Image (tube, grey):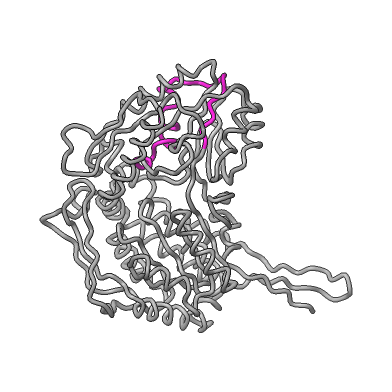
Amino acid sequence: MTATTAAPTASNNITHNAFFIGGQWRAPEGSGRISVISPNSGQQIGEVPDGVEADIDAAVAAARAAFDDPSAWSGLPASERAAALIRLADEIDSRKEQFAALVSAQNGMPITVASQLEAVYPATLLRYYAGLIAAQTDDIREGMFGGVVEVRREPIGVVGAIVPWNFPQTLAAFKYAPALAAGCTLVIKPSPETVLDAYLLAEAVEAAGLPAGVVNIVPGGRETGAHLVSHPNIDKVAFTGSTAAGQKIAETCGRLLRPVTLELGGKSATIVLDDAELDLATIGNDLFVATLANNGQTCFLGTRVLAPKSRYDEVVDVLSAFAGSMAIGDSLDPGTQIGPMSSARHRERVEGYIAKGRAEGGRITVGGGRPDGLDDGWFVQPTVFAGIDNNATIAREEIFGPVLSVISYDSDADAVAIANDSDFGLGGTVWSSDADRARSVASRVRTGTIGINRYIPDPVAPFGGVKQSGMGRELGPEGLAAYQNLKSVYR
């Protein structure tokens, strides 16, 4: 099946009427429905049940039963869990074109991006964590008071995983791949905006033969998610989403003394040093990934572009040409580089920030409106602001759209100070022809991740933020450790 034919349309809606709970397709407890609206056309393309508290209760009970039975999952040898992860990776691979098309049709992600990330990253993570657990060895330490100490890494328990709409399959895998590897069971709550791909994941789980209750999937809104977070039989919460929602989840988990991993918002800095290469033919693709990927709907993007005063006009011109050259269109068109915003409400939010930037004296050098000829979907032109400083609203708050702000600085130290003058600290990049100088600057930026002349989260390295960008880490061995409890056995 090709990516195009796999996508739902207004005349070919995808409809589901059950939830994947306890290894079975179970009828919902409520009567509510989630309508899936295409951001390309504004028309309905699918419909699924809307989960309620009773559905979460059933899913958590199934996950708890599966976890508490050591013969089902948590007590299996690591080699058996690793083999199951490989089977799941194979099943996901066999559906990768469908995954890409479903995600693109629901949230506006360009199909080329979806095919490179949403269709590939989950299976890659499953194989990576399968390899990690297969290679783990016993940790036996000589005791200082005689005897030995065995340090055991045991699964943390039942995990409530709440997944956002912008990279629904990739960010779900950030959670379920290490959790499954560790021996945990999960209840996954997808975002209402991207639910159709979650059903495809459930089909892959079923086909891979994972034991009943190990993975349960219940779509729903905020109240459903809140019930999952506070459920007494949840042992850990993993959340990716807005800082505001993350703060509420952190409060709940804090009262319950419940472990939580939070990957939240960002307002990262793209630091262009005065010796940087600015030839778009050379850096264009890497610059796109670092600043405008997925229509700007990506948490780590460096939307604050810091430019040296000596090259400020040049940087503005290069970015304006870059943003203005982006092909805007239907997300399922392979030629599209910038697709629509995920929803009408989200487009209003982005347009509100553009208006705020104008009102505060920003000068729009390219974009600023809606593209001609694309009246049915929720499109916004890539927009570049010049003439603002780091105190502007559009430089302080996460817009989550294709809007870049170019801010001038005097020296490397000044650039670092501006980069650090933010409530967030998730990503960022430094652009320079001098590797040592770039590393020196990068080392002084307060952020969880940063790239030099490129940026992409790598499965082997911890990913996460500081300040209001979150707490805890995903990916790498650290991502696996987040789903394990340490137990010292004195012998």
Q: Can I make out residue 123 in this image?
A: no
Q: Is residue 265 above or below residue 222?
A: above
Q: Residue at x 21, y 55 (%)?
A: 37
Q: Is residue 111 above or below residue 19?
A: above
> Magenta segment, which residues?
269-296
The residue at 36%/39% (across/down) is 353
Task: Report the residue at 44% width, 31% height from top.
Answer: 405
Residue 105 drawn at (x, y percent): 24, 50
**On the image, which quarter does residue 490 sit in?**
bottom right
Q: Position of residue 174 (x, y in %)?
A: 47, 57
Q: Give coordinates of residue 289: x percent, y percent.
A: 42, 37
Q: Position of residue 432 (x, y in %)?
A: 57, 25
Q: Is residue 374 left or right of residue 395?
A: left
- The residue at 16%/34% (across/down) is 373
Quarter of the picture containing the C terminus is bottom right
Is 155 contained in the magenta span?
no
Q: How many marks?
A: 0
Any magenta on residue 279? yes
* Most distant residue in the right direction: 145
Is residue 398 at all visible to an observer of this figure?
yes
